[in-house]
Amino acid sequence: MRWHNISLSFLNIDYVREIYNAMLEVDVNNTVSGDAKKSLETILQAMKIKSEELRKLDIKTESDVRKVFDSVFYAKKHYTDVISKTPLPQISQAFNELKDDNKSYNERVSSFLSKVNGGEREDIEDMAKEIIHFLEPEKYPLWTRWIWNKKRNSGSINYVLKDEVKINGEEDFWTSIDELKKVLDIFGLHSDNYYVTSVFLVYSYVRYLDYTTHLAVDKKAAGLIPTHLTTTALVLGLKPYLKVIKLANTRT
């Protein structure tokens, strides 16, 4: 492999390879269909649709607000609280500021958090970060607290680091993400944006939780448990867009 072309200071290559192989191998705990590559392609297609929908969305009604919250799986439960505490024009302004590429990443997140009232603050902050990722996946990776929690220095980014390496701030986080993107490209998961790194890190998080909570101990129950890639898609808020793809396929 073309390791001489890149310099890696953060990543544990053996672990990245392990997760890469697990994500794409035939495994009942990975994908029900047995075709993990096809499942991954479908997830990436759904991510593209989600980006397109968020980019063109203009919030004018409560139904439009509902669409945004439905696209972020952990935020859906906060919709009623937020819509009751935040005037519609204020939500619209907050959403539009997430689209404002004249502002920095952190400025957009802070603005959204200050304007959107109600809901759990950590979820609303993560919601802003997730929306920015899908608005500009070529520029910004997904950064939610299960990928990297800045306060606790926890999250799935730590799983892929060398044993002696720690994330000491945002610059280290961005650097580690870019290293991961380059390595996944070498492994064959090339992307001009950060979709693949998002899937990889969420998959790592889901897989870690699965094993630590012993969900997959009983292989007889595997068919009753959401697969790793299926759960990854749910965490990425892709359920509405997967339905669009399924409907399109049934009509072809």
Image (tube, rainbow, N blue to C red):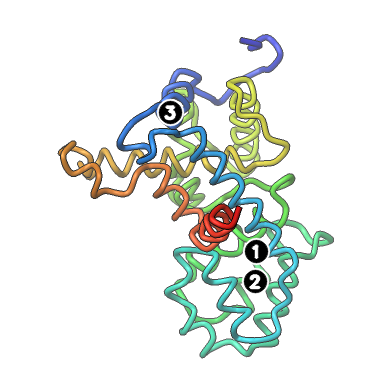
CB atoms at circles 3 and 1 under 8 Å apart?
no
> At x 63% / y 46%, what residue is drawn?
141
Give the residue number, with chain letter if any, for mark 3.
Answer: 19
Question: What is the residue that sits farthest to the front in this orientation?
Answer: 252
> At x 49% / y 46%, what residue is drawn?
147
Residue 159 occupies quadrant: top left
Where residue 151 appears, as percent x and y from the top left, is 47, 52
Mark 2: amino acid: Phe
- N-terminal of the pair, mark 3 or mark 1, is 3
Determine whether 84 is above or below 173 in the image: below
Q: Residues within 10 Å of mark 1 (few under 14, many from 20)?
A: many
- N-terminal of the pair, mark 2 or mark 3, is 3
Determine whether 191 is above or below 142 in the image: above
Badge nearest the viewer, 2 or 3: 3
Determine whether 135 is above or below 153 in the image: below
Disc number at residue 112? Answer: 2
Where residue 71 appears, as percent x and y from the top left, is 55, 65
Where residue 231 appears, as percent x and y from the top left, is 39, 49
Mark 3: amino acid: Ile
Residue 10 occupies quadrant: top right
Give the residue number, with chain letter if any, for mark 1.
Answer: 109
